[in-house]
Image (tube, rainbow, N blue to C red):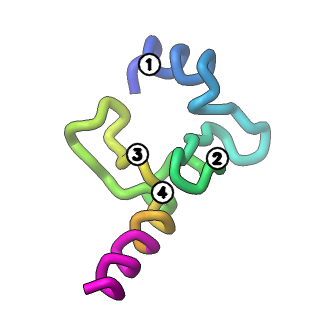
Amino acid sequence: MKASLLQRRLANGKAILDAELGLQKWCPHCQEYWPQDTLFWSPCRRNPDGLQSWCKACQLECKNAKRKAA
């Protein structure tokens, strides 16, 4: 991730630096911070940080809800 993007996200609260977990990213769906790695976030080439905007748990929840509704 570019330094300017990191600075912007830290300034607007979309990311935080934790002493134990390192860089954490905000999930707008569940409204929680999760470590910024592929264990919690799916890859996405078109996003500037290379990760999806929703965490994997929220993506799965949405997918299951759509499947259940169909």
Residue kind at label 1, given as amino acid type: Leu
Question: Mark 1, residues whose alpha carbon is within 10 Å: few (<14), some, or many (≥20)?
Answer: few
Find disc 2 in the rendering and name its residue.
33
User: Magenta residues: mostly which secondary structure?
Assistant: helix
Residue at the farthest left position: 46
Say if mark 1 contacts mark 4, CB within 8 Å.
no
Spatial separation of the CA atoms under disc 4 and disc 3? 7 Å
Residue 57, percent across and down? 50, 68
Residue 58, percent across and down?
A: 48, 64
Q: Earlier in the sequence, mark 1 or mark 3?
A: 1
Q: Quadrant of the C terminus?
A: bottom left
Q: Position of residue 52 (x, y in %)?
A: 36, 48
Q: How far apart in space, not on screen, are marks 2 and 4 (Cα)?
A: 9 Å
Nearest to viewer (mark 2 / mark 1): 2
- Tell me what residue is drawn at x 46 percent, y 15 percent: 3
Q: Which residue is mark 4?
A: 55
Structural distance between the alpha carbons of marks 1 and 4: 19 Å
Q: Earlier in the sequence, mark 2 or mark 3?
A: 2
Q: Which mark is residue 53?
A: 3
Give the magenta-colored segment's residue range.
61-70
